[in-house]
Image (cartoon, rainbow, N blue to C red):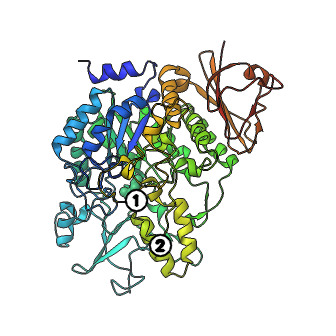
Amino acid sequence: MPSPSDAAHARNTVDAQPWWRSAVVYQIYPRSFADSDGDGIGDLRGIFSRLDYLAALGVDVIWLSPIYPSPQDDNGYDISDYRGIEPTFGTQDDFDELLAGVHQRGMKLVMDLVVNHTSDEHPWFVESRSAADNPKRDWYWWRQGRDGMAPGTPGAEPTNWESFFSGSTWQFDESSNEYYLHLFSVKQPDLNWENPAVRAAVYEMMRWWLDRGVDGFRMDVINMISKDTDLPDGSTLQGGLYGDGSASYLCGPRIHEFLQEMHEAVFSGRPDVLLTVGEMPGVTVEDAVLFTDPKRREVDMVFQFEHVSLDSGPGGKWDIKPLRLLDLKASLGRWQAGLAETGWNSLYWDNHDQPRAVSRFGDDGEFRVQSAKLLASVLHLHRGTPYVYQGEELGMTNVPFAGPADFRDIESVNHFAVATAAGDDPDAVLAALRVRSRDNARTPMQWDGGSAAGFSTGTPWIAVNPNYPEINAAAQIDDPDSVLAHYRAVIELRHTDPVVANGDFTMLLPNDDRVYAFTRNWQGSTLLVLGNFSGEQAAAPVPDESAWAKAELVLGNYPPEAAQDDPNVIVLRPWESRIYRRTG
Ligand code: NOJ
């Protein structure tokens, strides 16, 4: 039998250094992917049963959102045992079989590493909370209340910071009269990375997973692990109850030191077959160069958030404003330029925390199929490693949630409660949730037109999107014009044309508010990528247009066009995308 690396090589013929430049990653959200035992919750055996689907799609790496034991307050991002498997998802044997199945098919498996915080049910925190003089007390951030205020009363929290999931970031603990820090839910206390014993325990756990055969880590909010130990108050928005503490915990003072230490302790001396990607809200291009410069030995690539913040107003993610294509091009273009020489981009439209790509960046109505294909072509042809979120390859859409009871996500549920209690119009809050809730991405994967979309024989933990009879994998697998077929084609292009992995990037038509246009060039071969982000025809007056108009069309999202009136110009139909090639 060929070794996993032989098999991977057979899938991917492009010579790119490092290997992940020509790789595509597929993200699985285990709760919602495939349920093998009918309890309505996805599981490891369900994933195993779909590995051939993923291999046929052509992806190189699977990133699994957390599968560890967890009270599931934040769907597994609250971990109570870093070395176990959540029983709802399966057993250790199921995991070993899954890992072997992934490797046999020439793919790799990357785990989610959630070490900014644990669950409050993790034994470390249980100990830490048990007494102020417990040896693990300092593994978390415990602080007294504000001077001169009675502990536990409103406003007495050590800082004014607001949690990502609403309310204060501090939870009062009556038994010790102190507060602990939780940037996310009350059940997700932040680990204190200032303490070397915490760091050593995390690194040991990471080595344990690598020794077991996993191929790397996606590191959850990893740029939050270093905090300003003075813990100053943050600035408040006018009328706001809480302050923004992010200046104290995004890319804090010791972040590079911690990541370099982690690299040395966990990855050094291991073969270059692993993948590390750091999730980093608020990271700038300049920061990212430092994080991903191979010489600095920190992480391979980062998830930045700029392009998924362009449609938010000053009030944050629920303050929704229209997305302007010019802003999107300017932002992604800056990231391409900024990491052109040093470092590397990760490329994504969506994931388990974001709305569905086609609903946000495309048109999920009349032009759903065309715009989903366009988004694939445009994203995957950037320089960087693309990530596909489950169902994106089918053109799955946002969900028509009827009311507050349809939501499961802690962020959405808390936001609705807090905003309406503060007097916001419930209909307006609901309208924003429909657009932005993370639950849009978390409804079950749509496998077929049968009961529960083929996800489960039971009742899914969150309702299936009602459009599943039309949008599902079974309907697309043998259809050469499907969104799925288009994803296969762009993934294959990365594997076979070295320009995609290695080429430089030049943005064209930066001031055109409908057409996204760029070239990629490598060793005398150039690809031109065009995408019309509008529902009307749009001219694409790129430099050298007439030569491009006659060039080889590598991949489009419309049937080949009947001869145009003028063969020297390029006119794109609604949401049309084209990839052209010229050599020499
Ligand atoms: C980022 C994860 O992607 C998200 O789902 C989670 O809620 C937070 N980090 C907290 O772990």
Report the residue at 23% width, 48% height from top.
200
Rendered location of residue 236, percent (x, y)? 54, 73
Mark 2 or 1, nearer chain start? 2
Rendered location of residue 282, percent (x, y)? 51, 54
Say which mark, if any, is on residue 148.
Answer: none
In the rendered image, which residue does mark 2 sit on?
A: 416
Mark 1 belongs to which amino acid? Ala
Q: Where does the C terminus fall, quadrant-wise?
A: top right
Question: Which residue in the rendered view is the most extreme toward the front?
Answer: 450
SS category of the residue bearing label 2: helix
Task: Determine whether, in the image, residue 255 is placed left or right of residue 532.
Answer: left
Quarter where residue 499 is shown: top right
Quadrant of the image where one finds ligand 1: bottom left
103 or 329, nearer to the observer: 103
Rendered location of residue 193, percent (x, y)? 31, 56
- Beta carbon at label 1 within 8 Å of ligand 1: no
- The answer to whether residue 226 of the structure is visible from this angle is no
Report the residue at 26% width, 18% height from top.
2
Q: Is residue 115 above or below residue 109?
A: below
Q: Is residue 446 above or below residue 378?
A: below
In three-dimensional space, the C-alpha distance between marks 2 and 1, rounded to whole angstroms, equals 19 Å
- The answer to whether residue 102 of the structure is visible from this angle is yes
517 or 489, nearer to the observer: 489
In the rendered image, which residue does mark 1 sit on?
A: 463
Task: Determine whether, in the image, residue 570 is placed left or right of residue 552.
Answer: right
Mark 2 belongs to which amino acid? Phe
Pointer 2 local density, CA inside 10 Å: few below 14, some 14–19, many at least 20: many
SS category of the residue bearing label 1: loop
Pointer 1 local density, CA inside 10 Å: few below 14, some 14–19, many at least 20: some
Question: Which residue in the rendered view is the most extreme toward the right?
Answer: 566
Report the residue at 61% width, 36% height from top.
337
